[in-house]
Amino acid sequence: MTGTPQGDTLPLERDFEATIGHDQRIEPRDWMPDGYRRTMVRQIAQHAHSEIIGMQPEGEWITRAPSLRRKAILLAKVQDEAGHGLYLYSAAETLGADRGELTEMLIEGRQKYSSIFNYPTLSFADVGVIGWLVDGAAICNQVPLCRSSYGPYARAMIRICKEESFHQRQGFELLLTMMRGTPAQREMVQDAVNRWWWPSLMMFGPPDDASPNTERSMAWKIKRHTNDELRQRFVDITVPQAEVLGVTLPDPDLRWNAERGHHDFGPIDWSELKRVISGDGPCNAARMARRRSAHEDGAWVREAAAAHAARKTGREVAA
Ligand code: 3HC
C-alpha cells in the first residue's frame, strides 16, 4: 500500500487504522493521514533538536574534566548525542521533511527543543547528574518509543536507547565516586541534584490534562504511555537509586504510597516549564546563539558537500 490516494481515501484510512490497531508499523511509503505525518515530523524534529542542543550543557565541561578517563567518557557521550540527532533528522526526512528547513525552524524559534537543556552546568557534578537524571528520564521516555507506530522512529530509538543506558550508568558511577569522596564533593553532588530534579520531571511534558497532543498520539500509538505515567515511572525508578547514592531528592512530599504502589511527590511548578518553553529559561538565549553560530560556521561545509554532490551528479543540489 504505497503512494498518495486519488479520490476516496476511505479504504486507505481503514488500512492505516487496521495497521495501527494490529500494533504493526507504518512505513515511509505507506499512506498516512496528513495529521499523523505532521505529528511525527513535529515530535521527531523536536527530539532531534533536543539531542543537538543537549550537547552544549555537558560539552562545556569537556575541556575541564578532572581526569583523562572522565574526559574520554564525556567526549564519547556528547558525540553519541550528535549521532542521535542525525538518526532522528534522517527519520524525519523519511516523512518528506528537509533537515535544513527543520534547522531553520529551530533557529527561528518555530520549533522547540527540550526545556531541560536550558539550565546551566555549574560544576562537574552536573555532568554526573545529567547522565543519571536527564538520561535516566530520557530512557523512561524513549524505551516505549521503540514500540512507536512509525517504523523509522521506533528503529532509531532501539539504537539510541542502548547508548542512553551507557549515558545513565556513567553518570551514576561518576556520582557514586564523588559521594565516596570529600565532603566538598558530596556537597557539589547534592547541589546539582537540587538544581536538576524538578526540571527532569518537567522533561516529560505538561500534565496529561494540559497536554493538547497526548490523546491523539496515544490513539495513533506514537506515544505508548502518557506524560504523567512516564513521569511516575521515572520517580519510582529513581528514588531507590538516590538512596544508594546517599543524596536527598529536593521534595518534602516525596514518599512511598503503598495503596497506590507508587511514590507520591510534590506539586511541579508548571509556570516554570511554560516560561522555559517560551524561551525565558536561564540559558535559552545562550543555547540558541551557540546553535545559530555553529550553523553559520558550518555553512562552508554544506556548500562544499553540495558542490561536490552536484559535480558528481551533474545537477544543482540545495546547499
Ligand atoms: N520541553 C519543551 N517543549 C515541551 C516539553 C519540554 N520538556 N514538554 C512538552 N513540550 C511541548 C510539546 O512539544 C508541545 O508543543 P508543540 O505542540 O508545539 O510540539 C507542547 O509542549 C504540549 O506538550 P504535549 O505533551 O501535548 O506534546 P507531546 O505529545 O509532543 O509530548 C514529549 C511531549 C513528551 C516531549 C513528546 O514530544 C516526546 O516524547 N518526544 C520524544 C522524546 C523527546 O523529545 N525528548 C526530549 C529530550 S531529548 C533527550 O532526552 C536526549 C537525551 O540524550 C538526554
Image (tube, rainbow, N blue to C red):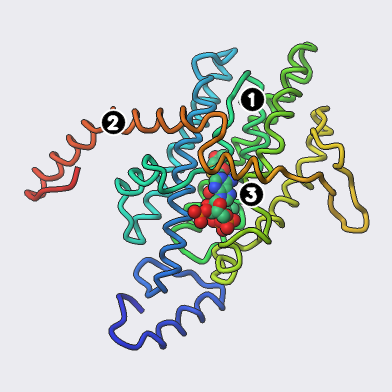
In this rendering, the answer to whether 99 lies above or below 293 is below
| Residue type at the position of mark 1 | Asp
Between 193 and 111, the one nearer to me in the picture: 111
Q: For ligand 1, tell me if the residue under mark 3 lies within 8 Å.
A: yes
Mark with earlier residue (3, 1): 1
Disc ID at residue 204: 3
Which residue is drawn at the image coordinates 64% and 36% (left, top)? Answer: 168
Q: Is residue 310 left or right of residue 220?
A: left
In this rendering, the answer to whether 178 lies above or below 88 is above
Mark with earlier residue (2, 3): 3
In this rendering, the answer to whether 58 lies above or below 90 is above
Q: From mark 2 to mark 1, how far is it between C-alphas? A: 29 Å
Q: Is residue 306 left or right of residue 50?
A: left
Per the image, label 3 sits on a secondary structure element best described as loop
| Residue type at the position of mark 3 | Phe
Residue 131 image point, x, y percent: 63, 33
| Residue type at the position of mark 2 | Glu
Per the image, label 2 sits on a secondary structure element best described as helix
Residue 70 image point, x, y percent: 58, 19
Which residue is drawn at the image coordinates 39% and 32% (left, top)? Answer: 291
Q: What is the quadrant of residue 306 in the picture?
A: top left
- Tell me, yes or no, if residue 187 can be seen here: yes
Residue 177 image point, x, y percent: 73, 20
Residue lying furthest left in this view? 314
Disc ID at residue 126: 1
Foreground mark, 2 or 1?
2
Q: From mark 3 to mark 1, how far is it between C-alphas? A: 20 Å
Foreground mark, 3 or 1?
3
Q: Are marks 2 and 3 in contact (CB under 8 Å)?
A: no
Between 176 and 141, the one nearer to me in the picture: 141
Q: Which residue is mark 2?
A: 296
Label 2: few (<14), some (14–19) or many (≥20) C-alpha neighbours in 10 Å: few
